[in-house]
Image (cartoon, helix red, strand yellow):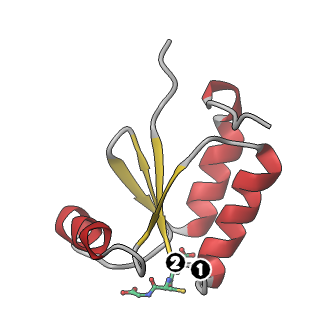
Amino acid sequence: MKTPLLELYYFDSCPYCQRVLNVIHDLNIKVEYKDIHENLNDMQKLLYITGRKTVPCLFIDGVPMHESLDIMNWLKSNLDKLEKEKS
Ligand SMILES: N[C@@H](CCC(=O)N[C@@H](CS)C(=O)NCC(=O)O)C(=O)O
């Protein structure tokens, strides 16, 4: 079965993003990163699709999930289905 594509919309100084980034790092999960302060197109895409600029937002195969706690719980619960970062 294909592993889901994960895209994290975030910015560095956001504490909620940092706790999601820590879980991603600790669990060695492969994620594509979209820094909305670095790339205006990513900010606009987030706003267009979700109607909000709030981060963190994890897109799971294109479906957005807000709320850092929900994202962290989802990552931990679905770890066996996720692609790992090469170390
Ligand atoms: N309850 C949310 C809080 C997220 C949050 O407040 N993010 C801030 C940045 S630290 C934000 O994106 N604010 C801009 C906005 O909501 O438009 C979570 O845990 O993910």
Q: Quadrant of residue 85?
A: top right
Kind of residue at badge 1:
Asp
Residue most toward the top? 1
The residue tagged with tag 2: helix, strand or loop? loop
How packed is label 1: few (under 14 Cα within 10 Å), some, or many (20 or more)? few
- Whether label 2 lies within 8 Å of ligand 1 gets the answer yes
Q: Is residue 42 left or right of residue 5?
A: left
Where the C terminus falls, by quadrant? top right
Q: Residue at x 70, y 26 (%)?
A: 80
Tag of residue 35: none
Q: Residue at x 66, y 52 (%)?
A: 73
Query: Residue 32: horizontal and vertical position, in percent?
Result: 50, 49
Q: Nearer the viewer, residue 26 or 40?
A: 40
Q: Which residue is mark 1?
A: 12
Are discs 1 and 2 less than 8 Å apart at CB?
yes
How packed is label 2: few (under 14 Cα within 10 Å), some, or many (20 or more)? some
The residue tagged with tag 1: helix, strand or loop? loop
Kind of residue at badge 2:
Phe
Q: Residue at x 64, y 35 (%)?
A: 78
Q: Is residue 38 left or right of residue 21?
A: left
Q: Which residue is mark 2?
A: 11
Q: Is residue 64 left or right of residue 44?
A: right
Q: Nearer the viewer, residue 8 or 33?
A: 33
Query: Residue 57: horizontal and vertical position, in percent?
Result: 45, 64
